[in-house]
Amino acid sequence: MSVKVTVDAMGGDYAPEEIVKGAVLAAREYKIPIQLVGKLEKIRAELGKYDIKGLEIELVRADEVIEMGESPSSALRKKRNSSIVIAVDQVAKGHSQALVAAGSTGAAMAASLFGLGRLPGIDRPAIGVLLPTMDKPVLMLDAGANSECEPEMLHQFAIMGSSFSSAVLGVENPRVGILNIGGESGKGNILAQKTYKILEEKQDHLNFIGNVEGREMYMGICDVVVCDGFVGNVTLKVTEGVAKMVFELFKSEINKSLLAKIGAFIAKPALKGMKKRTDADEYGGALLLGIKGTCVISHGSSKAFAIKNAIRLAKESVEKDVNGKISRLYELSKA
Amino acid sequence: MSVKVTVDAMGGDYAPEEIVKGAVLAAREYKIPIQLVGKLEKIRAELGKYDIKGLEIELVRADEVIEMGESPSSALRKKRNSSIVIAVDQVAKGHSQALVAAGSTGAAMAASLFGLGRLPGIDRPAIGVLLPTMDKPVLMLDAGANSECEPEMLHQFAIMGSSFSSAVLGVENPRVGILNIGGESGKGNILAQKTYKILEEKQDHLNFIGNVEGREMYMGICDVVVCDGFVGNVTLKVTEGVAKMVFELFKSEINKSLLAKIGAFIAKPALKGMKKRTDADEYGGALLLGIKGTCVISHGSSKAFAIKNAIRLAKESVEKDVNGKISRLYELSKA
């Protein structure tokens, strides 16, 4: 049976145009059924632009939209008919197997948590993101769901990250590290030190490689890195900020001389190749791990290409049974 | 009277060769007296390589060296004749006005704190580093001295950072932000939220602009950014890691085709210009702010160029009376 993915058609800076377009691309490329949730007339107008004959695209009505600036908890209470609430409900009722949302991250997280619940043994769901490295991408979690964390939560993040990395990314025995400011076991803040002790004890079920510093992480020395959601979110945004700065500085230097412009023009395929290797849209979105269900949260600025890839990520997470793997690893770690 | 700077000649990956070379360059370029502390025969052998006639270079004997791997506190207790301890002692006794050290950061910090003491009103000294942005560099503190921080410490970091930015970098009314994961006042962890309230109240003495996210920081929207030393150190190393990754990926893409190689060769001056704009060595080192004295801590991998610039930074910090400005701003903030 093929996986059905529900997409919040109204969430994101380019909704519904780019969201609908991405859904059409995914339905065509992956040959899977897709549910689009939102204002029917708007979605229909977008769908009218494409040849969707033979594609399994189903519409679900939702008349409200939670905007980016709204407080997630009060918006969810007030807008029971918002696209994100109804989209989560589709998954909760078993009408589909996974959710993709590009709107407010807070709202998507809260709606999924309340609508689907947590996996057994998981105290708090976490957001996992794939960061580019010199080698394979590294899965970092938590990227922003929990600003304050306990050491046991980071242990659970390690279990979730390791499960995702092996199941979906196909990494054998994923190397798990703690994002820290030094290599030795006594380094870092109290959270990092206590987490180190827990992960050291659980060595048999997780391939714990110790502390990982920011510099080495981008060389690709580990597959999963855990940290609290504040540090993770700062790291994610610093990564984006530095990459953007380097590209912009390069452009501004190039524009200073005609010769440099010619050189850059000739080297353009290489520049494009580099951009592709550091492009977050290649992965399509972040994962909300630890809930009873599958939820991919895309960047608010996602265009069709990112949405299509997010749908693929959601589909693969279901097919590869990430949640089953998390539960089995959790059972082992209890023993 | 010109500022005399003491340099720990034995600290750093390339000590004493590159340290001595940097000191000679600085003595020549800035026409200031310099003290080199360490093993005399080794320093003399290095000095023999240069024409130092007319330069004021003074040697101070220290027979021990604290290595990078040693625990700072126990090393300082055991090695009373180490170059860093004796170098700090020179400043403490008033034989010189500032210190430059490229060895163990922990040892330099602990030695300065014990040997020179804290400025009045400062609970904990912090490490300030200059990060590159699209515009002027931003001073981030704490970059690693204090893994656990209280909100009042971040307030003091703001005072120290603002003083340094205006005194040494010549920034008028420096914009101060909190490194955070969202723009609104309620965002982030408890530390960031409480710091926001303190800085908001102190608006009259600090130009507090609110929360700053990693992405915007590199666009150059503020002059000083405060955070705890764990987040700051992660940010520093992530910045270095991402910049390095982008350059390396670019090289590897370039090497895939001859045409790209030719293009990159033509565009080389632009690439060099970009590298220069993101090169930490341009600033020469991090500042230990909040101690009664001036101390610049250079990267362990510093070569002569970085050491020379670190000496200039130390000299300017003394000349521009950063510590006097910190004390005055602190008095104002108490009122």
Image: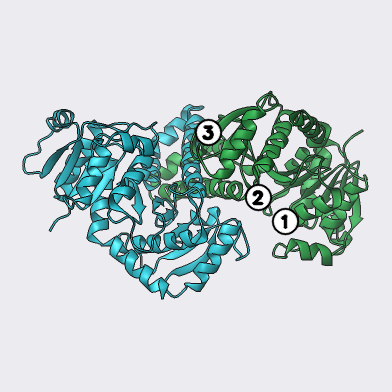
Chain colours: A cyan, B green
Q: Residue, x 22% and y 59% (percent of image)?
A: A319
Q: Are the residues at dot 2 and dot 1 in contact (C-beta closer than 8 Å)?
A: no
Q: Are marks 2 and 3 on the same chain?
A: yes
Subunit of label 1? B
Position of the N terminus of chain B, as image quadrant, is top right
Q: Residues within 10 Å of mark 3 (few under 14, many from 20)?
A: some
- Residue B118 position within the rendered picture, expressed as x and y whole percent measured from the top left: 81, 45
The residue closer to the viewer here, A139 or A101, is A101
Q: Which residue is pictured at 71% across the width and 27% down the height? A: B170
Q: Is residue B177 visible?
A: yes
Gap in Å between the C-alphas at discs 3 and 1?
Answer: 34 Å
Q: Which residue occupies 79% across, 31% down? A: B331
Neighbour class for label 1 at 10 Å: few (<14), some, many (≥20)?
some
Chain letter of the residue beneath label 3 in the structure image: B
Is any atom of residue B276 visible in this view? no
Determine which of the numbered discs, if any, sits on residue B185 in the image: 3
* Cα separation between marks 2 and 3: 25 Å
Residue pointed to by mark 2: B144
Q: CA distance from mark 2 to mark 1?
A: 9 Å
Label 2: chain letter = B
- Asked if both marks, 3 and 1, belong to the same chain, the answer given is yes
Q: Nearer the viewer, mark 2 or mark 3?
A: 3
Where is residue A200 drawn, in percent x and y?
52, 71
Residue type, mark 2 in image: Gly
Along the viewing direction, whichever of A246 and A321 lies nearer the viewer: A321
The mark total stands at 3
Q: Are marks 2 and 1 on the same chain?
A: yes
